[in-house]
Amino acid sequence: MIPPGIQTCGDPALQAHLTNLLARYGLRLVPHPARAPLPGSWWGEPEAGIIGHEVHVRPDTPIHSALHEAGHVICMDAARRATLHTNAGGDDLEECGVCYLQILLADQLPGVGRERLMQDMDAWGYSFRLGSTAAWFGDDAADARDFLRAHGLIDADDRPRFACRGAVPPVPVAASDATLAPFE
């Protein structure tokens, strides 16, 4: 049962923003109807599922879950991502990086933001040794931040770089420079 007040993927406007955010990473949001089975869900429905570059959600999937599973796809190395189905694997440090990244990504979604997402994570039952997600994020997440920086996933100012681990970030193309234009 979903705790009251948890933001979910059921809001069409929020789902559109989430779709656009994931697309910046080359990921695809795959919405499923209410009560439909969720492919790739490790924890079971309504938790998001991951298969390859796809994040599967339903209207009752919490936003924090969609961002968390997307974070796994973003943070894992390319070899694991190439065979990804359901189980993200990884170690404790990568898991911390995923949690940190999902909080940063929440700031990219209008009406969500890090404070709201951390409240939802606490209500859902995420467990951090300092007692709350906000305390962990503010005072105990240096290793997670260092992991994300070391893999080029965030910059020195904690801004997402919008590239998956091991992927080359897209190079902006100047409109007047035809030599850099991508092939059609």
Image: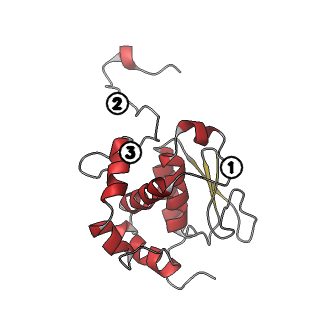
Report, in whole angstroms, how far the alpha carbon at label 2 lies from the one at label 3.
17 Å
Q: Could you tell me which quadrant the N terminus lies in?
A: bottom right
Image coordinates of residue 65 in percent, x first then y, are 54, 65
Task: Report the side of 133 relative to 62 (left or right).
Answer: left
Q: Residues within 10 Å of mark 3 (few under 14, many from 20)?
A: many
Q: Secondary structure at mark 3?
A: loop
**First in residue order: circle 1 vs circle 2:** 1
The colour scheme is secondary structure
Q: Residues within 10 Å of mark 1 (few under 14, many from 20)?
A: some
Give the answer, above or below, for where 117 lies relative to 175. Answer: below
Q: Which residue is mark 3?
A: 153
Of labels 2 and 3, the one closer to you = 3
Q: Nearer the viewer, residue 129 or 48?
A: 129
**First in residue order: circle 2 vs circle 3:** 3
Of labels 1 and 2, the one closer to you = 1
Give the answer, above or below, for where 123 lies relative to 26. Answer: below
Q: Nearer the viewer, residue 51 or 7?
A: 51
Amino acid type at mark 3:
Leu
Q: Which residue is mark 2?
A: 172
Kindly check if marks 2 and 3 are in contact, taking CB atoms under 8 A apart as contact: no
Which residue is rendered at x = 35% and y = 76% of the image? Answer: 130
Amino acid type at mark 2:
Pro
Give the answer, above or below, for where 174 lies relative to 48. Answer: above
Q: Nearer the viewer, residue 173 or 76?
A: 76
Which residue is rendered at x = 40% and y = 34% of the image? Answer: 169
Task: Report the side of 76 relative to 173 (left or right).
Answer: right
